[in-house]
Image (cartoon, rainbow, N blue to C red):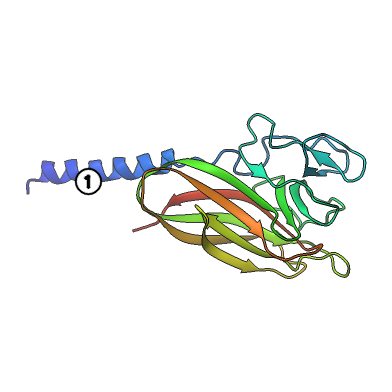
């Protein structure tokens, strides 16, 4: 094979790989596109904005939010957003590449997004995960699953006082197009995990 033909094929491969990276796009990957309105610095998902108790905000209906959150069931279960240093006791945000995180509290809270631009192949999901800095009646003893199209691709068992840690999971896409990414909590009761900075990239060959 001539040198020029080898260069052509190499350029074609690099272009294709770059295209995949650019196409897989998670909207609002760091949960910072929508400001938390309540002065306490956190709020549950609920179809109305209410800064009494429990603090709530309709993130799902806000343009540019990108995600779907499960709504609050009671004050010990649901999902929402928090900033650093709130009464929800998230891990320290110091040095993290994000300023807001989603929380998953109780049994079967979830956050999901339909992500477009996939081509068939192998991928790596990356995100920061941490647990509540509290113990006793409420804590960080939560278990989190990540799913693609309802198929579990990773499970993480947390305990209280776990700082934000970069986690990864590998998965395979068999069909081009759009696929649903979801995170959900499995532990019933007032047990909370936090996550942010969610990215998906083609797996390294």
> Is residue 96 at all visible to an observer of this figure?
no
In the foreground, 192 or 133: 192
Task: Give the residue furthest to the right.
Answer: 52
Task: Give the residue furthest to the top.
Answer: 63
Q: Is residue 14 left or right of residue 31?
A: left
Q: Is residue 4 left or right of residue 47?
A: left
Residue 28 appears at what percent x and percent y? Answer: 61, 39
Q: Is residue 19 left or right of residue 138?
A: left
Q: How many dots with numbers? A: 1
Q: Quadrant of residue 204?
A: bottom left
Residue for point 29% across, 44% down? 14
Q: Is residue 155 left or right of residue 85?
A: left
In the foreground, 80 or 31: 80
Residue for point 68% across, 39% down? 32
Residue tagged 1? 10
Residue for point 44% across, 59% down? 171
Residue 92 appears at what percent x and percent y? Answer: 76, 56
User: Which quadrant is home to the C terminus?
Assistant: bottom left
In the foreground, 188 or 1: 188
Residue 59 appears at what percent x and percent y? Answer: 72, 37
In the foreground, 108 or 87: 108
Task: Give the residue furthest to the left.
Answer: 1
Residue 184 appears at what percent x and percent y? Answer: 64, 57
Label 1 residue SS = helix
């Amino acid at each position: 094979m001539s040198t020029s033909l080898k260069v052509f094929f190499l350029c074609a491969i690099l272009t294709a790989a770059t295209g995949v990276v650019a196409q897989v796009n998670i909207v609002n990957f760091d949960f910072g596109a929508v400001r938390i309105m309540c002065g306490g610095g956190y709020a549950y998902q609920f179809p109305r904005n209410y800064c009494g108790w429990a603090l709530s905000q309709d993130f799902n209906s806000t343009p540019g939010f990108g995600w779907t959150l499960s709504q609050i069931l009671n004050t010990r279960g649901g999902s929402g957003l928090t900033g650093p240093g709130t009464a929800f006791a998230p891990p320290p945000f110091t040095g993290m590449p994000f300023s807001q995180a989603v929380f998953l509290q109780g049994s079967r809270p979830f956050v999901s997004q339909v992500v477009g631009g996939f081509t068939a192949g192998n991928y790596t999901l990356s995100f920061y995960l941490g647990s509540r800095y509290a113990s006793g009646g409420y804590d960080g003893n939560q278990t989190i699953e990540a799913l693609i199209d309802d198929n579990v691709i990773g499970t993480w068992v947390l305990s209280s006082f776990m700082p934000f840690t970069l986690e990864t999971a590998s998965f395979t896409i068999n069909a081009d197009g759009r696929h649903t990414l979801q995170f959900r909590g499995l532990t019933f009761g007032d047990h909370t995990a936090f996550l942010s900075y969610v990215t998906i990239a083609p797996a390294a060959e």
